[in-house]
Amino acid sequence: MSHSANPVNTPEVKRVVIVGGGTSGWMCAAAIARIAPPDTCITLVESEDIGVIGVGEATIPTLMEFNDFLGIKEHDLLRECQGTYKLGIDFVDWYQKGQSYFHPFGFYGRDTPEFSFHQLWLRLNAMAEKGEIPADAPGIISDYNLCTVAAKQGRFAPPQGGADTILSTMRYAYHFDSARYGQMLRRYAEQRNVERIEGIVNSVEQDSNSGLLQSVTLNSGQVLQGDLFVDCSGFKALLIDGAMQSEFVDWHHYLPCDRAIAVQTKLAGAPDPFTRSTADDAGWRWRIPLQTRLGNGHVYSSDFMEHDEALQKLLAGVEGEPVTQPLPLKFRTGHRKAFWEKNCVAIGLAGGFIEPLESTSIHLIQMGIQRLVNLWPGRGCNRSEIAQYNALMTADYERLRDFIVLHYNATEREDTEFWRYVKHMAIPDSLAAKLEIFRSSGRVIPSPEDLFTPHSWLAVMLGQGIYPQNYDVLVDRVPAQALLKNMQMLRMSVAKTAGSMPTHEEFIRRYCETK
Ligand code: FAD
């Protein structure tokens, strides 16, 4: 039996204790309740006095898989959580001031087994440069992306049809009220016998020989014993840092932003089907439209800007009346060297954090849960499986770090000290290799752990001014005139399809009414 081959000598998991009831705690509780054997006792402890971080309103498309796993319906999510659709992110002032580009979730045309679609567009550009076709014939790469064109028109439709249809290239995620999402998950978990305890964890007890966690004791004196402990206590990292002392891998030198201020404002008009990220002097500001309000925030580096200036810039940039007090937040970018140590697994902010530029934190929670479920330590924790878990989670974080670093490093901006720093800083070798390949051949080679598809890398690399020297010679087999004609037809078809979609607002209203 593989489980007894390399055990850490932990007991069978019959009692699971989850510390923390933020998005990560309730996602864990719901998922474990869904899969654990019926005799597993699941307890979640959280403190209303401490509260939750209260941000985290933008997601990426993978969340749909988690909701499907639990059986949460899209229309319930939209209705109960003020949800809107997200087709991608509009990046303003990142490459240069006054310039913007869109990172869509959907695909550019369709890749073939031999080459990626964008190679055709690169070849058109090469033909235009040589004067073989009119200069404006290739257009911009966004013209071939339905998500981008629909987003810019405030329209929405879900993907439909087979791989040969334009509508099948749509892909989307959600913006939502994360507190309400947490409540939905809490109801789901409590209906499946998860016990919620209100209280503050005061101390953590470990076996003096093995170092295994045994219990947590609350302020009230109540003792919660467990076989497996899931640390969802947010940045406090009560168990993984406090008791297990898992080292923190700090990425401040790659990603110097370490502060944020969040404020909600009233939404005037229809919600856009996209997040906006506007680069600022020492970081960036987010704008996330929900059904009746906007989530706004300013993420910045305290090495380069003071709180008061950051707050003033945030408030000067928001639209509409603030409906909440500005909430200041401190964070560290990086992750625990061991996410899982003995019988303690850290999920959510306790495990690590990469700033929210591409809205990936909830996804990382999801990955932590999915892997824990796949390696469920029902017969006790196994050393090799723990090592595997930690290696996979580390790879997720590293690939994601590279993608976020790309946004900062590939810039023409040198107008502030912050931008000069990120433009000239040393970048991870893995990212440097990816950029070198793209610059020379236009190829985007996906790493197995890449969360973002080559289409996402492409959008950001081109959007941030990285243009390849060559295109793939394999596309030369396509006759030039046929290429031009097909690309023109595709652009027209994208424009026509987007124009025939309902507005985003109308789609949400109709969808929620009819379900
Ligand atoms: P928290 O929400 O902090 O929950 C911690 C829990 O632990 C709470 O219930 C608290 O009461 C409990 N607790 C702590 N100490 C104790 C104790 N001693 N005893 C008992 N209970 C205790 N993610 C996205 O996916 N998209 C985004 O757009 C996004 N934007 C973000 C913007 C910013 C500025 C930041 C900082 C984060 C953002 N995130 C985003 C991340 C997202 O907010 C988190 O991943 C998510 O909220 C999960 O947090 P958590 O549950 O790990 O921690």
Image (spheres, helix red, strand yellow):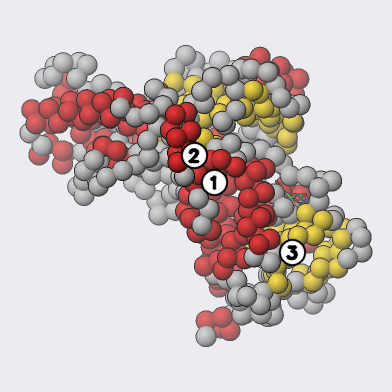
Amino acid bearing label 1: Asp
Q: Nearer the viewer, mark 3 or mark 1?
A: 1
Rendering coords of residue 94 (x, y %) = 49, 23
In terms of depth relative to the viewer, which is nearer, 508 or 172?
508
- Disc 3 is placed on an element classified as strand
Residue marked by disc 3: 195
Dot label at residue 512: 2
Q: Residue furthest front?
A: 514
Quarter of the render that holds ligand 1:
top right
Disc 2, SS: helix
Q: Position of residue 437 (x, y in %)?
A: 33, 40
Label 3 vs label 2: CA separation? Answer: 32 Å
Q: Which residue is mark 1?
A: 76
Nearer mark to the viewer, of 3 and 2? 2
Are the residues flagged by discs 3 and 1 in contact, CB closer than 8 Å?
A: no
Q: What residue appears at the point 38 percent right and 44 percent down from the top-left corner?
A: 453
Residue shown at 68%/66% (left/top)?
193
State the CA–CA distance, disc 2 to disc 1.
8 Å
Closer to the chain start, of discs 2 and 1, is 1
Whether residue 8 is situated above or below residue 436 in the rendered picture: below
Q: Is residue 300 left or right of residue 374?
A: right
Q: Which mark is residue 361?
A: none
Position in image of residue 202 (x %, y %): 87, 58
Q: How packed is label 2: few (under 14 Cα within 10 Å), some, or many (20 or more)?
A: some
Q: Is residue 461 left or right of residue 334?
A: left
